[in-house]
Image (cartoon, grey):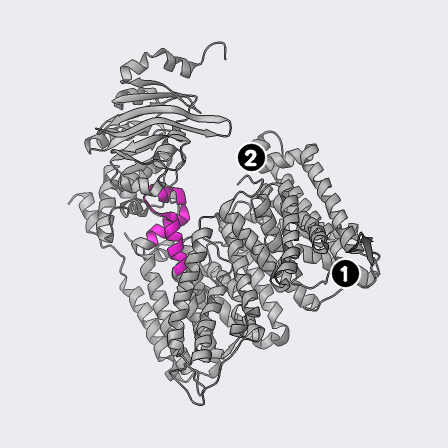
Amino acid sequence: MSILKVENLSKSFGGIHANQDISFEVQSGEILGVIGPNGAGKSTLFDLITGFTKPDQGSVIFEGKNIFGFRPDKISNLGVGRTFQKLKPFADQTLLENVMIGAFSKESNQKVARDKALEIIEFVQLLEKRHHYAKELSTGQRKRLELARALATDPKLLLMDEVTGGVDQKTIPGLVELVKKLRERGVTVITIEHNINIIMDISNHVLALDQGKKIAFGIPKEIQNNQKVIDAYLGTIDAA
Amino acid sequence: MQAVVTGLLMGLIYALIASGLSLIFGLMEIVNFAHGEHLMLAMFTSFWLWALLGLDPIVSIPITILVLALCGIVTHYFLIRYILKAKMLVQICATFGLAVFIRSLAQFLWTPDFRNISKPMLEGRIEISGIFIGQPQFTAAIVCLFAFIGLYWFVTKTETGLALQATSQDRQAAEILGVPSNKMFALGWGLGLGCVAIAGSMMSSYFYIFPDVGINFSLFAFVAVALGGFGSILGCLYAGIIIGLVESLGGLLIDPSFKLLYVFAIYLLVVIFKPQGIFGRY
Amino acid sequence: MSDLKIAQSEPLFNSNKKMTYLVLGFFAFLILLPALGPTKFFLHLMIMIFMHAVISQSWNIIGGFSGQISLGHGAFFGIGAYATSFFYVEYGLTPWIGILIGIIVCAIVAILIGIPMLRLSGHYFAIATLLIGISFQIIFQRWDLVGAASGLWVPLTSEDSLYAIQFHSSKVPYYYLFLIFFTIIFFITWLISRSKLGYRLRAVRDDAQAAQSLGIDVAKHKIIAFAISAMMMSPMGSLFAQYILIVDPDRMFNFEISIIALLITVLGGIGYVWGPLVGTLILIPLAEYARIFFGGTGGAVDLMVYGIVLMFICIFKPSGIISFLPNHILHREKMR
């Protein structure tokens, strides 16, 4: 059974159709890449799935359960984690504390939560920075902080919004490796990415959006050669 | 019917005061908790100009506006500048502290006694089909209405006004387009206080003047801005009138000593059921 | 051992022997203080310090730990004061039970206010608390059942009475009463600060959306914090009523209480367990001595000073005086 099924999801803000009639399925244990030019509605899609925005219509079914209209914290507790495109670390708290707050979603015992947080911090390779304040960390480190924090909630499905955005070149391979390792841990991942190479490298399937609509869905090889996708990114010559 | 008219007139004054508040919030995202205190200062300024120089409040409006403008510059320079970028918590505490300071300064300098201007230029009542309207109240309301219209016209029709709106909607975008934020903030702050200066001067003809007089007006202004929608000047007009009517009719129909509570009740209702207010953006 | 194992075997809390002894010694000193023969004024000062420290700590829970500014916290103080006095005057019920009633009522009021209001953004909530605070004063000024504007007239017992919590021969019993509550409430705050609840509250304060994405029910946590905060405030009103034995709306629902709670916490260090105490130790002795020197006009002058201090702190040191301490001392209590 698919871990996530999205059907006819739509959302408009005033006159802007951020998401129009989007449907797709995600299999358990896979990595789904989401691509599309800026403004295509990718982040809105995430907001709809994680409950931060209420869809106008459509349904979101997670593990067989319709989560339409659920509050974000309830959805998180069901097993859906996310990171944000615009990073939201708890700036005045340390890395360890940030991740612990994530751990507290499933653990009540402080020591257990702390140890679990440490384990995940080691997974994202930031152990030596655990007592540093979030505001002291570099962008790449903050991305890992958010990833660790979300991971600490033991999600079955993790939505990552642009993990490599704004990160310098040499840090990227490390992050990509982390995402692949997530699959090994049994976490299903949906990731928004601008870097097409990365998406093609790590994804089992790719969902392409443009102007709020789904324009393609399939394995990376198909998407790469999909004319609609190419057009969306390059734009037609007349429009330029 | 009498109550309706009284409420309407008072409402226009509330509307102007609230517009000032709304302007400041829309521009700088700072809720000026000291708004009522500035109103009180305006009233006291009118009073002292009358008591010491014999100037009628109507005549001294320009001077009062100048005095308030000066106060505005001082507070902006010493306080507001620093908290523009601070956390909301800090901003609230800062303007709240300002309010407390101005209020107690007034109490210290001028004692808590009630003052009032006797024999102002405007006095007496006019009668329109059986309803008595005090001349000062009527004139005050009309002046406030005109001031409001003036403000509205300025903000929506003039170039500077549009620049002001641009800054309030998206500061960065406006700056890129060449609109200097700092000047806009100072302007907004000044206009906001200008509203209060006019309202205060007009009211000093007939209202009792004392250090705590600003508190109620502050609160009503908050309610008005919340009701009309933070950031909407037109909303303030409708909201101000509604508040004036509720205060007056509530006092008439239920119990005058609980007038404040009726207005507060509006706030609670609005905020629970329609948080953006009538025209709000937030 | 791997780095991870080393990290996981570190103790959860920095238990620093020096710090622990310091705090214990401090409390031991407070317990023994009356034996050193202090003056009545000094005892009064200490009582005021305890009371204001708790009032501010109560505000700290909602303002500092959860990040919601309340400008009408004095309402809970007043409720606590009237709870003990009313039931004693009308029914002869011992104020000890009155204190409990006050706490329960305040919790209920906080929850009733919190449910609709805490969903709102900070500004709306602050204004709402301001309105509610003033509303309480207006209501109690006109409510005949509790004596309206003249308040409740509490009959004085002829002798010191533990039952009626009235002590006329000396301030020492009051001192211990306030000390006990001070200790309990600061202890509870300390526990909350290092507990799962404390961590989640701080998350809500720092970034509500991120907190939600981590499974935290933001609204529920804010209401919990508000209720706890109200429950801490109430006993102070109750005890104060027993201390001065004059209970009227002007004293008990005085706006100054709300201002001071906020001011002391912001001054001392918002969000820190000891912040309120630091603020109290700076402000209250000054206020009490100023009251002696300025006498009549003292009323307006101390408010003026409060306003100035508040503005100053907001401009120059918004995190409070306590943040002058170096980070490693400041955050000693955090989990590692």
Residue A88 seen by the camera: yes
Work out whether residue C173 or residue B4 is closer to the camera in this orientation and state it. Answer: B4
- In magenta stretch: residue C202: yes
| Magenta-colored span | C198-227
Chain where mark 1 sits: B
Residue A19 picture quarter? top left
Residue B47 numbered mark, or none: 1
Q: Residue, x 43% and y 85% (percent of image)? A: C170
Residue C44 numbered mark, or none: none
Q: For the view shown, which residue lies furthest in the bottom direction?
A: C158
Which residue bears the numbered disc 2? Answer: B170
Q: Amino acid at mark 2?
A: Asp
Q: How many marks?
A: 2
Q: Earlier in the sequence, mark 2 or mark 1?
A: 1
**Horizontal side of residue B212 vs A158, given as left or right:** right
Magenta segment's dominant SS is helix
